[in-house]
Image (cartoon, helix red, strand yellow):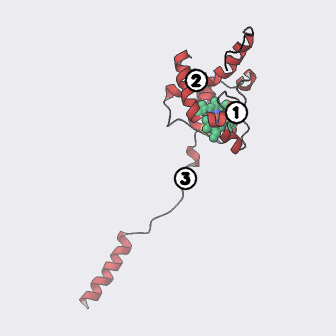
Amino acid sequence: MRRTLFVASAMFLCGIVFPRPNFTQEKAASTEPKMTEEDTAKKNPIPPTAESLAEARKMFGYNCAMCHGKTGDGKGDLAADMKLELRDWRDPASLEKLTDGELFWIISNGKGKMPGNGERDKERMRWNYVNLVRSFAKKDAAAADKPKTENPQP
Ligand code: HEC
């Protein structure tokens, strides 16, 4: 009798002490980042230098070129696989309407199929990317101004 009582009360207690977990899915759609006017107006604090661009180009090769292409033409292998339609940054008109702040925000947070890099790359590096992305067009424009010389490449 005693034993039965003990077992019964133990079972009873378990029901109280271990209530069923509540699996409500409060996944945070509302915390998804949104670009604000402040973000759009942000100025690039990092001046483009040969050094910072070289550093950005190296990381771009690892993290971005598979989609955006080594030259920024938007024709990376992964972009082709994913059937992405990317801007050709060699065309100066392609990014004309976007501010540095917007580019920085997209690089940091991602947009659509583009993954964000806010956790992988430091803030300084993300501004470096902005400079690099802008430079793809400038480089071509500068090259077009140069007098045509023999191409030294084999
Ligand atoms: C999986 C493919 C993919 C990778 C990897 C990727 N991007 Fe993108 N990126 C996109 C897509 C798609 C868009 C267009 C997003 C939209 O407008 O919906 C985009 C947009 C951008 C934009 C905004 C301007 C524009 O052309 O629309 C910038 C700047 C940018 N990417 C930079 C980068 C940088 C820098 C990296 C590497 C750190 C990177 N991306 C890696 C797919 C990618």
Looking at the rendered structure, the secondary structure element under dot 1 is loop
Describe residue 31's horizontal placement relative to residue 18 as left or right. Answer: right
Vertical side of 68 occupied by 19: above or below: below
Callout 3 crowding tier (Cα within 10 Å): few <14, some 14–19, many ≥20: few
The amino acid pointed to by label 3 is Lys
Horizontal relation, residue 86 to residue 128: left or right: right
**Of marks 1 and 2, which one's residue comes earlier in the chain?**
2
- Which quadrant of the rendered structure holds the C terminus? top right
Please give the count of numbered marks on the rendered protein.
3
Task: Report x, y in % for residue 11.
Answer: 34, 79
Image quarter hosting the N terminus: bottom left
The residue at 57%/38% (across/down) is 116
29 vs 101: above or below? below
Q: Quadrant of residue 117?
A: top right
- Image quarter for ligand 1 equals top right
Residue 35 in view in this figure = no
Dot 2 falls on a residue whose secondary structure is loop
Q: Nearer the viewer, residue 50 or 151?
A: 151
Mark 3, secondary structure of its residue: loop
According to the image, label 3 marks what residue?
27
Q: Which residue is mark 1?
A: 74
Q: Position of residue 25 (x, y in %)?
A: 54, 58
Give the residue number, with chain letter if any, for mark 2. Answer: 42
Give the mark, 2 or 3, whose residue is nearer the N terminus: 3
**Against 92, is 23 above or below?**
below
Residue 27 appears left or right of 72: left
Residue 132 visible to an observer of this rendering: yes
Separation of residues labelled 1 and 2 (CA atoms): 25 Å
Identify whether 118 is placed above or below 150.
below
At which x and y percent is residue 55? 52, 24
